[in-house]
Image (cartoon, rainbow, N blue to C red):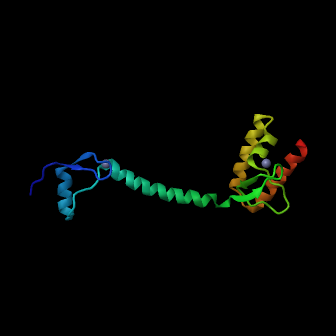
Amino acid sequence: MEFIDRILTCADCGGEFIFTAGEQLFFFDKQFKNDPKRCKPCKSKRSGAALKTGTGLAAAGLSRTETRTECSACGIETTVPFKPTQGRPVLCRQCFQSKRAPTSGALVTAAATADMVAGAGPEHAAVSAELLTAAHATQA
Ligand SMILES: [Zn+2]
Ligand SMILES: [Zn+2]
């Protein structure tokens, strides 16, 4: 059985691609009945998209700690990356940053704290709420 390269049309992008003799031999060997439907870039794009979907789900799972609450300073509805403790003040991102804004060093600290809180459990959240309260008190 002899094979020659054939030009096929991709079902996804409509572009032409070569179904090589070697690939045809492979298909024949595997007893695949159908010609390949997609060019290589589209094929890898599809498997890449499938991978991305999995990653997206994982990312969505990570954001499950976001809690809806009201900012103690301006009253706006906001989400925090931790479970706020009852009765403790919570600041929205804007208020949190404006309290810490005066020096760039403080901003870095604020960002670092936010990161720390994002990765921390509820017990750490209570500590961070206290930090926020302390920031409130010193600035007011
Ligand atoms: Zn294609
Ligand atoms: Zn606020």
Q: Is residue 71 above or below residue 106?
A: below
Farthest residue toward the top?
A: 103
- Image coordinates of residue 128 in percent, x first then y, are 79, 53
In the drawing, does residue 134 fall left or right of residue 76? right
Q: Residue at x 88, y 42 (%)?
A: 139
- Image coordinates of residue 11 in percent, x first then y, are 29, 53
Q: Residue at x 82, y 49 (%)?
A: 74
Task: Name the residue nearer the viewer: 45 or 128.
Answer: 45
Task: Name the residue nearer the viewer: 48 or 72.
Answer: 72
- Image coordinates of residue 68 in percent, x first then y, are 72, 59
State the image quarter where residue 104 is shown: top right
Which quarter of the image is occupied by the C terminus?
top right
- Image coordinates of residue 132 in percent, x first then y, are 82, 50
Q: Residue at x 81, y 52 (%)?
A: 75
State the image quarter where residue 127 is shown: bottom right
Q: Is residue 79 above or below residue 136?
A: below
In the drawing, does residue 26 fall left or right of residue 101? left
Q: Residue at x 61, y 58 (%)?
A: 62
Q: How many numbered dots are placed on residues in this image? A: 0
Which quarter of the image is occupied by the N terminus?
bottom left
Task: Name the residue nearer the viewer: 131 or 75.
Answer: 75
Task: Name the residue nearer the viewer: 126 or 38.
Answer: 38
